Amino acid sequence: MVRSLLGLLLLAVGALSASISIGLQGYRALTREELAARVEVRPLGDRRFAATFHIPGRAESSYYELAGDALYVDAHILKWRPMVNVLGLHTAYELDRVTGRYDDLEMERSASRTVHTLAPERRVDLFALRTRYAFLAPLLDAEYGSGAFVRVSEPADFDVFVSTTGLLVRPRESAVR
């Protein structure tokens, strides 16, 4: 009788451990953030700044001169349904462009505009495939563009992350400390 109870207790503990592990895996999949770029910004003058992008997986950095008060980055995002996330397929993204952004709306309309592409030439474009093939729709929660901006008034280093909800720009941790 004691052996049976001990066996049932061990099975219950094992089932609880497995449930917690699966739950944590699902939580990690739904809250995952991936580093999309490291950016160094340096002011060049009045409402002008330079941004150097270091994108993981690319050998060379990209340098851009931008006009405005803020660095604005946007991306194409393919967000999979939660069940697909749990199976290991994570949010797919491609950084699309970088531009300067003015705080003042009138300046945004009339001042010098700068925009540069961040997207490499690709043989396979997931965003275009999803648009072309409807059978992928049940697997996707959303296909959208996401953008984030951060004010540039002094030299700074930023990390651009892609999460399951879109782009995030944060000061680089090593620069904060």
Image (spheres, helix red, strand yellow):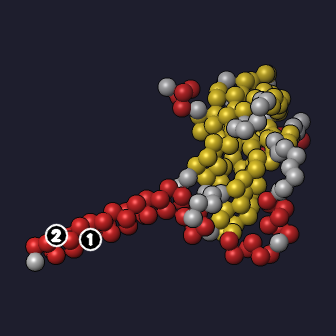
Q: Position of residue 132 (x, y in %)?
A: 86, 69
Residue 41 in view (yes/no): yes
Question: Mark on residue 6?
Answer: 2
The residue closer to the viewer here, 101 or 105, is 101
- Left or right of 62 in this view: 31: left
Percent x, y of residue 164: 61, 57
In this rendering, the label closer to the viewer, 2 or 1: 2
Q: In which quarter of the image is residue 98?
A: top right
Q: Quadrant of residue 113?
A: top right
Residue 61 on image: x %, y %: 77, 29
Residue at (79%, 22%) from the top-left corner?
Answer: 45
Q: Residue 62 carries which label?
A: none
Disc 1 residue crowd, few under 14, some 14–19, many 20+, Cα 10 Å: few
Left or right? Give the position of 86 relative to 13: right
Q: Which mark is residue 12?
A: 1
Of the residues shown, which amino acid type is indicated by label 2? Leu
Q: Classify 6 as above or below 30.
A: below
Are the residues at dot 2 and dot 1 in contact (C-beta closer than 8 Å)? no
- Nearest the camera: 65 or 56? 56
- The answer to whether 110 is drawn above or below residue 154 in the figure is below
In this rendering, would 120 be left or right of 157? right
**Residue 52 spot, x, y in % from top left:** 75, 29
Which residue is pictured at 83% across the width and 64% down the height? Answer: 129
- Identify the residue shown where x is 86% and y is 39%: 116
Residue, x 37% and y 65% (percent of image)? 18
Q: What residue type is labelled 1?
A: Ala
Q: In which quarter of the image is the N terminus?
A: bottom left
Helix, strand, or loop for circle 1? helix
Q: Earlier in the sequence, mark 2 or mark 1?
A: 2
